[in-house]
Image (spheres, rainbow, N blue to C red):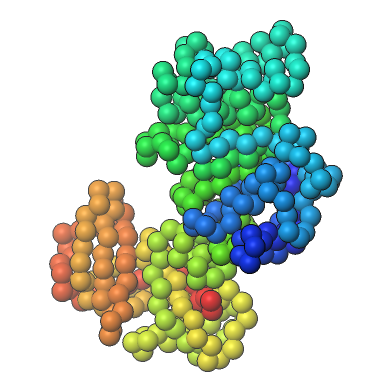
Amino acid sequence: MTNAVSLHGVRKDFGKLTALSDVTLEIEDNEFFTLLGPSGCGKTTLLRMIAGFENTTAGTIHLFGDEIEHLPPNKRPVNTVFQNYALFPHMNVVENIGFSLRMLGWTAAKIQARVDEMVEMVQLGAFVHRKPSQISGGQQQRVALARAMAPRPKVLLLDEPLSALDLKLRQEMRAELKRLQRETGITFIFVTHDQEEALSMSDRIAVISDGKLQQIGTPFEIYEHPNNRFIANFIGETNMLTATVNAVDGLHVACHLAGGERLNALANCQNLVGANGVISLRPERLSVSKTAPTGDILKGVLGERVYLGTDTQFIVKLSGELKLKVRMQNSIFQGAEFKTGDPVFVTIADDAARFLVD
């Protein structure tokens, strides 16, 4: 597989502040690749360095094998879709989409053919003569995408392009973005702080925190096999239980919890007996029952039950101050059987417990 973008040892300093430190990653051609992390973690800075809007302090950036750090932004075969879309308010849809093509010196006939193609691709045929103020936010985003893709860039950079949209429209545009990426074959590098966006659209995800690359993997790998406590806590919901290792068998460890309970878990690295860390338990990988099942279980008392439509959330009190959040589909149990104060058993799905040392 050809690498569209390669970064090796990339660092970015702003004076005494290090925004990014030793970032090395490979982004494959025709990949939907997401840079995910909280605000201020360095993900937009990394995108801007690929685009040429920021210089690297150290390290190298290659595009399809060619070093591009010496090239100005307008000479790099990449385009950027910004958070605010940056459409020209005095131009209509057709004029906005064709603007970059005119700047590149395309002929009128070639521009018209490409604009027609892009209008059809983003499904805006009924709005071609309208200006940005006369169309919705979702339609404005489609214009921005069409304009960025019209020159056929090798890589498209997207800087939180869905953040200005309401929830329902964001969800619709996720599917639209993935469709456009598949149909065009362009490598998408997408920046977001929204975990659901990243999980639902990406081929692979790079999680960034405090300017450092924490983990790269598929959505499944990032969610189910987090490298550390930050990733487990940042990607979706999880329970974090302080634990100490009692015995080690490869990457499986036997632990005891702060309240004295015993629990087996998979570890994120080789650990020694006595190592301290946390056990991560996803709420949807747990279930509650009133009778003791087989397998890994924890005993507790039902503290709270919240009906959420498709599922129900339980808060189970363990010994001491420990609490567990459990989410169960309403189709697989009779919710009326559970009452606050009932003694219950929490069953843990196979390999759902993860021991993390940091």
Image spot of residue 154 (x, y percent) = 73, 35
Q: Residue at x 26, y 64 (%)?
A: 314
**Snapshot quadrant of residue 71:** top right
Residue drawn at (52%, 48%) of the image: 192
Image coords of residue 241 (percent x, y) = 40, 77
Looking at the image, residue 232 lies above or below residue 67: below
Whether 64 is drawn above or below 208: the answer is above
Name the residue at the top extreme. 109
Say whether residue 248 is left or right of residue 22.
left
Decide if residue 294 is on the left or right side of residue 104. left
Residue 29 in the image: state x and y as whole percent. 73, 41
Which residue corresponds to the image point at 53% horizontal and 16% vertical from the top-left?
A: 91
Left or right position of 298 against 157: left
x and y, in percent, of residue 30 in the image: 69, 39
Residue at 58% of width from left, 56% of height from top? 42
- In depth, the one of 334 and 48 nearer the eye is 48
Tell me if I can see residue 3 in this picture: no
In the depicted structure, whether residue 86 falls above or below residue 230: above
Confirm whether residue 294 shows in the render: yes
| Residue lying farthest to the front in this orientation | 15
